[in-house]
Image: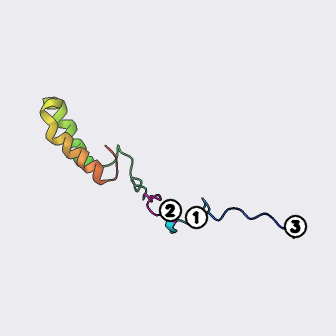
C-alpha cells in the first residue's frame, strides 16, 4: 500500500492541556482586572489629604498619607 509513512509512536508536542504530557508545564495566569478609573481620578479623598500634607509639611513628613493613597490605588487595581 502506498499510504503515508507512520511517524514514531511518541506523543505529539501538541498534546491537549489536560493530558499527562503537559501536567505541570502549563501555567494558567488569570490577568489582573483592568482598573475602571484613570489613576488621576481614583481615590480622591486620600489624594487630597496626601497633596495637602505635602504642600504644608513636605514629602518626608507625609509618609502616612502617601502610603494610605498607594494602598487605596492598589485596592482599585493599580500596580503602584
Look at the numbered discs 2 and 1 and tell me whether their residues touch, using CB distance below 8 Å: yes
Q: Is residue 66 shown in magenta? A: no
Residues at marks 3 and 1, CA–CA distance in whole angstroms: 28 Å
Where is 25 relative to 73, above or below? Answer: below
The residue that appears at 61% across and 61% down in the rendered structure is 14
Q: Find disc 1 in the rendering and name its residue.
A: 15
Query: Left or right of 60: which side holds 30?
Result: right
The residue that appears at 14% across and 41% down in the rendered structure is 64
Q: Is residue 25 shown in magenta? A: yes
Q: How many labels sit on residues?
A: 3
Look at the numbered discs 3 and 1 and tell me whether their residues touch, using CB distance below 8 Å: no
Number of the label disc, if any, that sits on residue 2:
3
Front of the two marks 2 and 3: 3
Query: Left or right of 67: which side holds 6?
Result: right
Number of the label disc, if any, that sits on residue 22:
2
Q: Nearer the viewer, residue 40 or 24?
A: 24
Query: Left or right of 33: which side holds 19?
Result: right
Front of the two marks 3 and 1: 3
Magenta segment's dominant SS is loop
Quarter of the figure with residue 39: top left
Q: Earlier in the sequence, mark 2 or mark 3?
A: 3
Graded by Cα atoms within 10 Å as few (under 14), some (14 to 19) or many (20 or more), the crowding at tag 3 reads: few
Query: Left or right of 15: which side holds 20?
Result: left
Where is 52 relative to 6, above or below? Answer: above
Number of the label disc, if any, that sits on residue 26:
none
Magenta stretch bounds: 21-29
SS at mark 1 in the image = loop
Quarter of the image for the N terminus: give it. Answer: bottom right
Residues at marks 2 and 1, CA–CA distance in whole angstroms: 7 Å
SS at mark 2 in the image = helix
Amino acid at each position: 500500500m502506498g499510504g503515508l509513512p507512520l511517524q514514531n509512536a511518541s506523543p505529539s508536542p501538541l498534546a491537549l492541556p489536560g493530558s499527562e504530557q503537559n501536567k505541570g508545564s502549563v501555567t494558567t495566569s488569570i490577568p489582573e482586572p483592568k482598573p475602571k478609573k484613570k489613576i488621576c481620578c481614583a481615590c480622591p479623598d486620600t489624594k487630597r489629604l496626601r497633596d495637602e500634607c505635602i504642600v504644608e509639611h513636605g514629602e518626608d513628613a507625609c509618609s502616612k498619607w502617601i502610603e494610605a493613597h498607594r494602598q487605596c490605588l492598589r485596592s482599585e487595581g493599580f500596580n503602584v
